[in-house]
Image (cartoon, coloured by chain):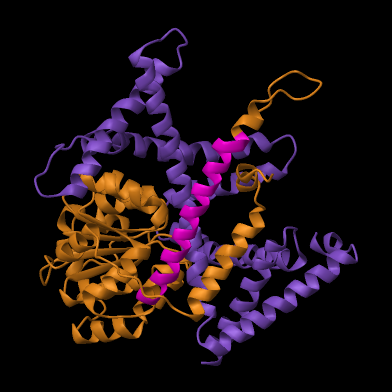
Amino acid sequence: MIEDILIKYIGMILVIFLLTSLYGKATPFHTFAISLLQAVAVAYLVVYCAGAIYNNFLQIFQGQLLNIIGIILGLMLFFRFIPGYSFLSRIPVAFSAGTLLGLTLRTVVFTDIIGFIKASIAPLFTPGDVYVNFVNISTAIFTITILLVFIYTFPSTTKGPLRTIGKLGELFFYGGLGGMAANAFLGYLNSAAATLAMYLTPMSDAAIFIILGIAALVIVIALDKRGILEKYTE
Amino acid sequence: MVDMFKVMATIDRRIYFLLFLTIMIGGSLYPVVLPMPITNWTQTFYNKVNEVQPGDILIVHMGAGPEVRLNMWSAYKLILWQFIQKRPRIIWMTTWPNAFPVGEMLLNDPLIKDAIKMANYVKGVNFTDIGFVYGEPALVNLAKDFHGFTENKFKGTWLDEVKDMNDIQYYLCFGASGDYHWAAKQISLIYKTKIFTVSDPGLFPTHIIYMQAGNFYASIEGVTGSAEYELLTKHYGEAVGRMGIISMTHLAFVLIIIIGNIGYFGWERKERAKPIKNLGEKHD
């Protein structure tokens, strides 16, 4: 119970620290919160992975000899710190990247190329479903026009309706990129809204949050006025 | 005279952030309830989970980090709860170190704990945690040879009937950003397992494509899906309450996009086309 309360208020303080970046300049509070997150994440990973590596090491004595290769490849990464031999650290990276690429390539053509083409082929008119009709028709128009972008827009010699269609496709293409960026940003806004909603209920917590927020802002402004904000940020 | 287009194009970004902050704080203090229809995706997902039969085998792929606790928790919790109501046998696996505490939190949630108790789940009998499945290559090996990958640790248990992924009927991917991709590439194409995925909002368009291509059996967008699932399962909680704030924030965001575009086409575009003084060249 006490643990939950502590976690909640420490979380609230760290959220306020992060929000101080809205002041428009880097602040020591923001730097502290970010550094703390990185430190905790790295510490957790190191502890967890050390345990996993130790278990894999023990398994060598139970006959899992392939683990020796894994451990040797892992240790080879440390060559990066030895001048003159740092190139050896590329071997394990190349080995894992190559293995993964091999596993991926056997299916990715079917899932991410043929599958996506298959998904974009749909009946243009489904009686009684306006939304599905809208999605399918716009998918067909966007697919055809955006494909034409690469064929007819960039060569400067193309003229007439093909170029117009290509230009239209270019607009859809940028619209799609804008939509993806907006979608990603809205995702962050969702997280921000959910975080604030968590710390602003009940009303007593909201009062604490607002008071702490104003206090942090006043300190940041005071540090900035004295010209020492940057000094404590690094 | 004030050039409104210029004003729209040059509004200080901090004002926008302040606007978002005000809406979020205001919405939290004075919740606004807006009408919310159930989307087709969520309804389909819900209906397809209802197809699960007692005794079917379900893999729960836990790959999400603690950030899901913020706004997708209801979806995670209620989807798992709905599956448990159908009494499949469950294989639990974790694919990222930071997903272990999330899985633990989920299984210790009072709703899930009660459901597990009611459905008579017993560790090793109809619920088995196989631990850490470290990455895509590991998933490939697990799918190909279950007991080989798990070093025969589960021989002699109910998992004897699982030889490879074809023996597993359902795969529930509570994955981090890239995990669903592993399921699409390494499972959907090769095995007949039906894949359910829960997506964060930014990646949901890709999930829809995978769904339409037949790689995923059903997918749900986690944030809106949380609120919709609360409505569908009648477990009203935090997600429905937050949808008002989220909708208001989205509305503000759309307004900002409109203002920014009007400012761009009314003023900024012309300004950019002007040659820079003394240079006589266009600037970007």
Across and down, in percent, residue A35 comes to 69, 64
| Left or right of residue A20: residue A171 | left
Identify which residue, B149 or A171, lies in the foreground.
A171
Residue at the spot 47% in from the left edge and 10% down from the top edge: A156
Q: Is residue B204 above or below residue A11?
A: above
Chain appearing in orange on the rendered image:
B
Q: In which quadrant of the rendered image does the C terminus of chain B lie?
A: top right
Identify which residue, B50 or B268, lies in the foreground.
B268
Q: Is residue B178 magenta?
A: no
The answer to which quarter of the image holds residue B6 is top right
Q: Is residue A82 above or below residue B117?
A: above
Across and down, in percent, residue A130 comes to 18, 48
Across and down, in percent, residue B226 comes to 33, 69
**Chain A shade:** purple
The answer to which quarter of the image holds residue B158 is bottom left
Asked whether the viewer can see residue A64, the reply is no
Across and down, in percent, residue B206 comes to 34, 46
Residue at the spot 16% in from the left edge and 36% down from the top edge: A124
Identify which residue, B203 or B161, lies in the foreground.
B203
Identify which residue, A52 or B184, lies in the foreground.
B184
Asked whether the viewer can see residue A122, the reply is yes
Range of residues picked out in magenta: B240-268
| Left or right of residue A5: residue A67 | left
* Magenta stretch: helix, strand or loop mostly: helix
| Left or right of residue B63: residue B268 | right
Q: Residue at the far front: name it.
A: B1
The answer to which quarter of the image holds residue A87 is top right
Q: Residue at the far bottom: name it.
A: A1
